[in-house]
């Protein structure tokens, strides 16, 4: 299934910290655009052991995108009951660190008399003040891997859904491009013939007053030959044929499965090249306008293609 490179997924699991205390572990998986698969991990120390397993899962499921796993945990609110029966269930205060923090605060207030004192919450959050229960390492790793797998599945689901929406957008754009080609292509021979006739008339008028009758007849034949050759050079039949071929290749890629982003990006370059050629060879205002519309639609497609895996 075609997928977008952007998406988000999250999942949570519980980890036993012992003494009846439970921690809620939350794992998030975010993805944005990238040329290649770029994995990042922001995990607390308790969850670091799960990184290899998370990396393997991601590389097996994803092909492109900047993907980041984030994990955070907090003690479950239900641990309050355990704290009543066991005062140390939620952790013990390190008195030495607390005394050092108090001394540090006094010195800071001497230098900054207007500074406010630290709140209880700020004191408890200070590194090393509270030694929190950690639980078993195996429990942390198992919970992180399980939550990470669920978050990755949610991420992939969101990427698939967005990918299908992008397919619909791109298909509508290729339909508009075909309509433009269908409308302008039959008129090109007429435009070329009109331009050829107009060019011949202008050249003949410029030379009529200067050349003798016989020489003028020979010169006019030469002029017609040059005009025909120029008309061949401005003929855009091949460009229209290649344009339709590339559009068919885009539709085929969109109807397929798996990563198609790089292939579609290459096709955008080819489509843009043909549109530029149409614009440079244009001999009518309508044809020039059609080429500009095609380039605008191609640019819209290019922006959307950048999101596809």
Image (cartoon, grey):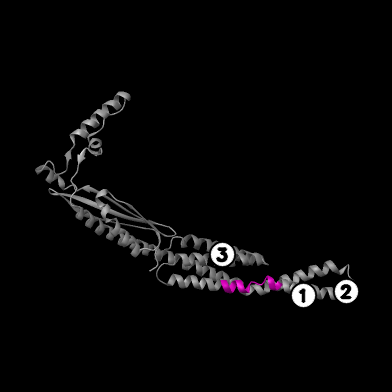
Q: Which mark is residue 198?
A: none
Q: Is residue 147 above or below residue 203?
A: above
Q: Which residues are magenta?
A: 231-242
Of the two numbered discs 2 and 3 on the same chain, state the one appearing first in sequence.
Answer: 2
Q: Is residue 182 left or right of residue 154?
A: right
Q: Is residue 110 above or below residue 41?
A: above
Q: Secondary structure at mark 1?
A: helix
Q: Is residue 213 left or right of residue 159?
A: right
Of the two numbered discs 1 and 2 on the same chain, state the one appearing first in sequence.
Answer: 2
Of the two numbered discs 1 and 3 on the same chain, state the one appearing first in sequence.
Answer: 1
Residue, x 27% and y 29% (percent of image)?
A: 104
Tell me where residue 31 appears, x and y as whole percent. Answer: 37, 57
The residue carrying mark 3 is 272
The residue carrying mark 2 is 215
Q: Residues within 10 Å of mark 3 (few under 14, many from 20)?
A: many
Quadrant containing the C terminus in the rendered view: bottom left
Q: Residues within 10 Å of mark 1 (few under 14, many from 20)?
A: few
């Amino acid at each position: 299934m075609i997928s977008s490179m952007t998406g988000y997924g999250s999942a949570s699991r519980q980890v036993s910290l012992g003494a009846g205390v439970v921690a809620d572990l939350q794992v998030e998986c975010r993805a944005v655009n990238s040329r290649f698969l770029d994995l990042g991990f922001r995990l607390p120390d308790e969850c670091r052991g799960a990184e290899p397993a998370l990396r393997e899962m991601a590389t097996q499921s994803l092909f492109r995108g900047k993907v980041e796993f984030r994990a955070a945990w907090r003690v479950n609110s239900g641990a309050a009951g355990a704290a009543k029966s066991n005062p140390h269930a939620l952790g013990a205060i390190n008195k030495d660190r607390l005394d050092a923090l108090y001394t540090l605060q006094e010195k800071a207030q001497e230098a900054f008399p207007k500074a406010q004192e630290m709140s209880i919450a700020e004191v408890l959050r200070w590194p090393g003040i509270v030694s929190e229960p950690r639980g078993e390492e195996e429990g942390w790793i198992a919970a992180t891997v399980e939550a990470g797998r669920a978050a990755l599945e949610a991420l992939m689901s969101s990427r698939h859904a967005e990918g299908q929406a992008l397919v619909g957008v791109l298909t509508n754009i290729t339909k508009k491009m075909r309509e433009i080609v269908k409308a302008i292509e039959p008129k090109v021979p007429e435009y070329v013939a009109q331009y050829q006739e107009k060019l011949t008339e202008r050249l003949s008028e410029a030379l009529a007053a200067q050349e003798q009758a016989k020489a003028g007849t020979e010169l006019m034949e030469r002029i017609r030959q040059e005009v025909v050759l120029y008309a061949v050079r401005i003929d855009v039949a091949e460009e229209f044929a290649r344009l339709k071929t590339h559009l068919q290749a885009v539709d085929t890629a969109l109807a397929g499965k798996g990563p198609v982003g790089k292939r579609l990006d290459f096709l955008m370059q080819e489509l843009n090249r043909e549109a530029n050629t149409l614009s440079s060879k244009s001999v009518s205002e309508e044809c020039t306008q059609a080429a500009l519309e095609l380039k605008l639609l191609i640019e819209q497609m290019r922006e959307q293609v950048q999101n596809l895996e």
